[in-house]
Image (cartoon, helix red, strand yellow):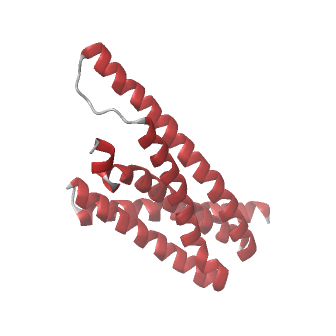
Amino acid sequence: MDEERTEGIGYHLEGIAFGLADGIICYLGLIIGFAEATNDTYMVIVAGVIGGIANAFGNSIGFYMSQSAERGLQIHRIEEYRVQTRVHSKRKIVVNSFLAFVFSIIAVLALLLPFAFLDMAHSTTITFLLGTLLSFSLGGYVGKISREGQFKTGLKYALLAVAGAAISHLMGDVLKALLS
């Protein structure tokens, strides 16, 4: 059995984690800031979907370019310095890039879902709590598999999400004041 088949989801966690982490933090900020600036559920959903699709493409293309550049560096090290190192296969790069796209979309859909069913105030609160919880959970999982500590890494991810949401909320206030 080749190396690609035996690694399973472990290797693909890179694309999944990238898509989720970036998606949650980016969309949480975008949604919270846009909700604060407009107080319009329809506009929050439209901005979230359009921003979500654009960011998902950006995530997957950026991930692909980064991993391709890293692959080139890995090959160079082997050829030039005879260093034994792992080389990303082209297939793994494509699969991880696709997963970054898919999980970015999943993140935006999860965070926008409350806006489809609830009023603005409840949707914003639930989205904030959901984004923070998802960030903590992802960080906890990453902390567990990287042996950096589940709680510590989860807390770090959650605090980053809260910081992004707080800054975006403030920017929403500023834009609302400037454009009103």
Count of residue discs? 0
Which residue does the image show at 20% across and 56% down from the upper left? 147
| Image-based side of 4 in relation to 64, left or right | left
Question: From where the camera sits, is residue 6 visible?
Answer: yes
Using the rendered image of the protein, determine whether residue 40 is visible from the camera's viewpoint: no
Q: Which image quadrant for residue 180? A: bottom right
The residue closer to the viewer here, 163 or 130, is 130
Asked if residue 66 lies left or right of residue 58, the reply is: left
Residue 107 vertical position relative to residue 129 in the rendered view, above or below: above
Residue occupying the point 26% across, 59% down: 143
Q: Which residue ends up furthest to the front in the rendered image? A: 1
Q: Residue furthest top?
A: 80
Q: Nearer the viewer, residue 159 or 108?
A: 108
Q: Nearer the viewer, residue 111 or 2?
A: 2
Image quarter where the N terminus lies is top left
User: Does residue 115 lie above or below 81 as drawn?
Assistant: below
Task: Please name the residue shown 54% across and 71% down the image.
Answer: 110
Task: Answer above or below: position of 58 versus 39.
Answer: above
Question: Is 4 left or right of 123, judged from the image as shown?
Answer: left
For residue 81, what is the image quadrant?
top left
Q: Position of residue 96 (x, y in %)?
A: 45, 48
The percent position of residue 132, horizontal first and vertical second, equals 43, 70
From the top left corner, tell me how far across and down residue 158 is, in percent.
Answer: 39, 65
Question: In this orientation, which residue lies closer to the viewer: 128 or 67?
Answer: 67
Coordinates of residue 23 in the picture (x, y in percent): 52, 58
